[in-house]
Amino acid sequence: MKTEQQKELTDQQIKRRNFISFTAFGVLGGLAVAGWEWLYKSGPENPGITAGAHKPLRRALNKTELFFRRVFSDNHFVKTYPKSMAAEQVRQNGDLGIEAPLSNNWRLSVEQASGQKLFITFDELKSLPKTEIVYDFKCIEGWDQIQHWGGVKFTDFINHYKLQDQIRKQYVGFETPDGGYYVGIDMPSAVHPQTILAYEVNDKPLPMENGYPLRLIIPVKYGIKSLKRIGSITFSNNRPRDYWAEHGYDYYSGL
Ligand SMILES: Nc1nc2c(c(=O)[nH]1)N[C@H]1C(S)=C(S)[C@@H](COP(=O)(O)O)O[C@H]1N2
Ligand SMILES: [Mo]
């Protein structure tokens, strides 16, 4: 048992403890301020990519991104279903870039490695081999639906139009004809064997609201990346602009 006397701290001890705690407080506080300043002064990352996050924060996100990119590599296939399980009433969500009437001389604009553009007609696309997929389409807002899409596999498209040089780049950009909606896709996901340029749903041409005449169907990603009414396709080593990434969503948006 300690006596009352022993429990009491001497003036000397109190001074010493105060000194230690104030010093520790000062040092930690200083570090916190310095850390904050470093973060704050680090500047935004490249413009047009996100809603202006500070670079180090984005770096952490990019690390997780890299992790997912390694896990979900080319040989990761999204689960598919029999056609009988596909929804008859396909959901419709989001009309950015597709509100205005579609021009009646729509062409798909594709940037070649030379910088020259191809302008491809709907009939020409339909004459290429058709690929179909039935999978669970997932929207980031919390709904999903098993849907049956048909169109041209992206890699078939690349080979047909001799765009092999273009897919050595890191990203593909898709935009609506009016530029009202746009997405950027990392190349491994774009050339994934389940990625298609779709012109059919349930064996019929796409309804306007689902992206007539041509939309992206990229099953390895959330629905936000499956851009409806494609106007142009471009290739680059810098991240193409991406509508929802600019509004704070994850650029990669993989599943
Ligand atoms: N042009 C365009 N494409 C778009 C969108 C949009 O607003 N405009 N919304 C995206 C989102 S968030 C989803 S979930 C899917 C929905 O596709 P659906 O309407 O065929 O269900 O389209 C994606 N593609
Ligand atoms: Mo979505």
Image (cartoon, rainbow, N blue to C red):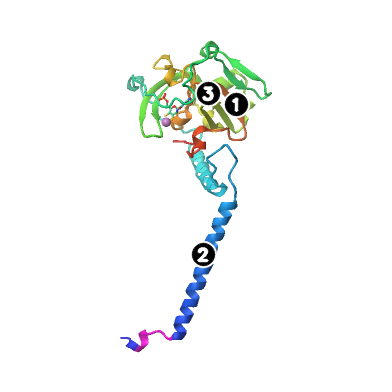
Q: Circle 3 is placed at which residue position? A: 176
Instruction: Read off the magenta span.
Output: 5-10
Residue at the right extreme, as displayed: 114
Crowdedness of circle 1 by 10 Å Cα count: few (<14), some, many (20+)?
Answer: some
Calculate the distance from the C-alpha at mark 2 to the C-alpha at mark 3.
50 Å
User: Is 84 on the left or on the right of 99, as rendered?
Assistant: left
Q: Give the residue type at disc 1.
A: Thr
Q: Residue at x 42, y 20 (%)?
A: 209
Q: Position of residue 72 (x, y in %)?
A: 48, 37
Crowdedness of circle 2 by 10 Å Cα count: few (<14), some, many (20+)?
Answer: few
Q: Secondary structure at mark 2?
A: helix
Q: Looking at the image, is mark 2 or mark 1 nearer the viewer?
A: 2
User: Is 200 on the left or on the right of 63, as rendered?
Assistant: left
Residue at the front extreme, as displayed: 100
Q: Circle 1 is placed at which residue position? A: 234
Q: Circle 2 is placed at which residue position? A: 29
Q: Position of residue 38 (x, y in %)?
A: 58, 55
Residue at the left extreme, as displayed: 1
Calculate the distance from the C-alpha at mark 2 to the C-alpha at mark 1.
48 Å
The image quadrant in which ligand 1 is located: top left
Q: Earlier in the sequence, mark 2 or mark 3?
A: 2
Q: Give the residue type at disc 3.
A: Thr
Q: Give the residue type at disc 2.
A: Gly
Q: Secondary structure at mark 1?
A: strand
Q: Is 143 included in the stretch rendered in magenta?
A: no
Calculate the distance from the C-alpha at mark 3 to the C-alpha at mark 1.
12 Å
Dot 3 beta carbon under 8 Å from ligand 1? yes
Q: Secondary structure at mark 3?
A: loop
Q: Position of residue 255 (x, y in %)?
A: 44, 36
Nearer the observer, 231 or 161: 231
Nearer the observer, 59 or 15: 15
